[in-house]
Amino acid sequence: MLGRILTKLFALFGMTLTCVACYGTPYDEYRPYFRASGRVVDEAGNPIPGIEASLGGNHAQSNDNGRFYVENLDYDLLTLTDIDGEENGGEFESKEIELRYQGQNDIGVVTLERKNKEN
Amino acid sequence: MGKRLGVRQWLALKLFKKLRKIRAEEHVLNTLFWECTLRCNLQCRHCGSDCRVDSALSDMPAKDFFRVLDNEITPNVNPNKVLIILSGGEVLVRKDLEQIGINLYRRGYPWGMVTNGLALTRQRLDSLIRSGLHSITVSLDGFEEHHLHIRQNKESFGRAVEAIRMISADKELASDVVTCVTPALLPHLHRFKEFLYSLGVRQWRLFTIFPVGRAAEDMSMQLNDEEFTYLMEFIEECRKEGRVMASYGCEGFLAGYEMRVRTNPFECHAGIGVASIRVNGDISGCTSVRANFTQGNIYKDNFWDVWQNRFEKFRNRAWAKKGKCADCKMWQYCEGNGMHLYDDDENLLVCHYHRLTK
């Protein structure tokens, strides 16, 4: 307990206390290399909640503001899929987006087209 | 400043003393060195890697390391928070480096490597990044004349510079440059800092050479006490300027320069948060710690048992309170300097505090 308090106290003064080991490399914690975030909207710019964002086997759903975040170890194709049919503002076409690089990919605003009901 | 502690330093060191004791008791593993090869593509003058080990010693097979990782380490740690550092020798000579990297990455371990940059092409770096490389350090020991004097290979400077340019441009990689400061480089440090800045370097670690390995007999590689003190002042000046975050390597207690030339107070992490597996299977703190501090061997012992139940000399430094340290008023903050600064008879080779001239 005292250790945690002291660690936080030092952190307040910018000391992380996990410094570079002698002759080592800068300390870094693990992070998945493919990370994608963005916001899905309809043609009118309204946010679409409940859209599934998938990277390989990892899935996440967009929130009420249409925002999503998903990550995976080594998968570079992001798929956005409407999985709730007519709920949340209608049924939308899926979209695939190739991530440009490993690391954080901010996709920005993605507009999904409504499914053509005649098809 | 200098040898004397300021009030804030005194207070911080007093608090840190308590924390260091707790950290030694808890000894949470956060960094694991794997000395995966002793082969090297250079023959540097100052190499302290391990001159006393037979250079014909073969690389440790990856399956031996992963057996220990999977059976003895992973069940006891959060892999996401244990940085695995591949060290050598020169790690890029291993042809299975990418395979090793991706296997670490898929187990959730961040991994890093230290390299002289000679074999780091764009293609190789890309393939290492695809294998989950998180952190990388490249050595550059000054301008071309200084670097070549130490590295003794005509291509070594240009390749290292190119490697530094590449890693500095990659925002996903944690990276820095390490420099062994020699007397010849000392008058050019300001200009060299600007050169590094132009390459994109923002984190720079400076070391001085300690008398182990090939540098032990070569006095031209070592700074005298005035030069050493000047180096501390230079680092402090760089940090105040803030363009390149220079820091002195973590190896010595620096009294009035504590937290002025490094972000954190001095602490030898070996055996506290840092362990190593050497090429012959020996288990120790940092790879630079001498062989007589070896705590076990992966071919005979269970790594986790060793980590939990041995390392007494690393975690309780009472044995080191002898010689110059016996009556030193800084002992309580320093506890006898870095573990790698002890010789085979457990005598301290270098005291950084006593080197300070101001």
Image (cartoon, coloured by chain):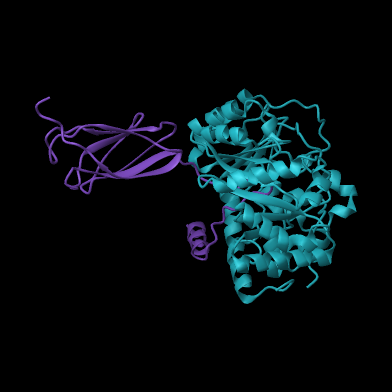
| Residue B7: % across, % down | 62, 76
Residue at the far bottom in the pictured view: B7
Residue at the far left in the pictured view: A118
| Residue A49: % across, % down | 20, 43
Residue B352 left/right relative to A16: right
Residue B285 seen: yes
User: How many numbered marks does the figure carry?
Assistant: 0
Residue B151 left/right relative to A94: right
Residue B166 left/right relative to B226: left
Query: Where, by quadrant of the figure, is residue B129 drawn?
Result: top right
Which quadrant would the C terminus of chain A be assigned to in this image?
Answer: top left
**Rendered position, B352 above or below A116:** below
Residue B249 seen: no
| Residue B357: % across, % down | 81, 70
Q: Drawn colour of chain B?
A: cyan
Q: Drawn colour of chain A?
A: purple
**Rendered position, A68 above or below B62:** below
Q: Which residue is painted at 70% across and 61% down in the image? A: B334
Residue B223 left/right relative to A27: right
Q: Which residue is painted at 70% across and 34% down in the image? A: B278
Query: Where, by quadrant of the figure, is residue B189 drawn?
Result: bottom right
Nearer-the-camera pick, B215 or B278: B215
| Residue A10: % across, % down | 53, 63
